[in-house]
Amino acid sequence: MKKIYPVVCLLFLVTYFSSCEKDDICVDGDTPLLVIGFFDIEDTTLAKSVPTFRITETISNTEINTITSGSSSLDSIGIPLRIDASSTSFAFITESTTTEDEEETDNIDTLTISYTITEAFISRGCGFVANFEELGVQLTNDEENWIQDISIQQQTIENSNNIHVKIFH
């Protein structure tokens, strides 16, 4: 009996430590954002800030970001695209103010971004991320569009490091 006890303990310890898995920590597993840069319509290489800028997703009426560009210049912004649909619509609002009734009183341009979703496996810890291909952008025309032109720089969104779409105003 005295000889069996150490053998059982040794087998238990070997089994216990050999069944441990290493920790899978996800470092680079994020679905990329659509990066939009704002540029001057007259000098297309010059970044141009947008005064009191705000973006709202129009389907779920979710505010994405509010930026007040006074002393700092806004050169680009990253916004999330829906992964449960093949398009996302945003209201791009310049000189944004709201009335007491929570209605927008300033210039609102609506952009619809269409895309194809592809999944990429990153690792066990990160799982899958969504990438976007075949990017398309459509501006809803109205009487007072502040967005004058749009240029797609990259058809595929695999990271948030570069500008994918340029907006000229």
Image: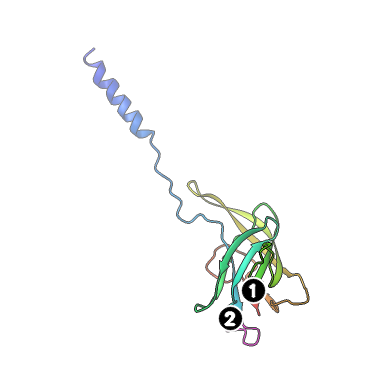
Q: Secondary structure at mark 2?
A: loop
Amino acid type, mark 1 = Thr
In the image as oriented, which residue stretches furthest toward the top? 1
The quarter of the picture where residue 140 lies is bottom right
Q: How many marks?
A: 2
Residue 41 painted magenta? yes
Residue 72 painted magenta? no
Which of the image's four quarters has the C terminus?
bottom right
Q: Which circle marks residue 122 in the picture? A: none
Amino acid type, mark 2 = Lys
Q: Is 32 in front, or is 53?
A: 53
Q: Which circle marks residue 94 in the picture? A: 1
Instruction: Indicate the position of residue 57 as horizontal and vertical percent values.
Output: 66, 60
In the image as oriented, which residue stretches furthest toward the bottom? 42
Which of the image's four quarters has the N terminus?
top left
On the picture, is 143 further left or further right than 34? right
Instruction: Indicate the position of residue 103 as horizontal and vertical percent values.
Output: 69, 64
The quarter of the picture where residue 141 lies is bottom right
Is the residue marked by circle 2 packed among few (<14), some (14-19), or many (20+) residues within 10 Å? many
* Residue for badge 2: 48
The relative height of residue 39 versus residue 164 in the rendered view (above or below) is below
The relative height of residue 167 versus residue 2 in the rendered view (above or below) is below
Q: Which residues are magenta?
A: 40-48
Determine whether label 2 and label 1 are within 8 Å by CB.
Answer: no
Magenta region, main secondary structure = loop
Which badge, 2 or 1, comes first in the chain's sequence?
2
Is the residue marked by circle 1 packed among few (<14), some (14-19), or many (20+) residues within 10 Å? many
Which residue occupies 25% across, 18% down?
5
Instruction: Indicate the position of residue 129 as horizontal and vertical percent values.
Output: 57, 53
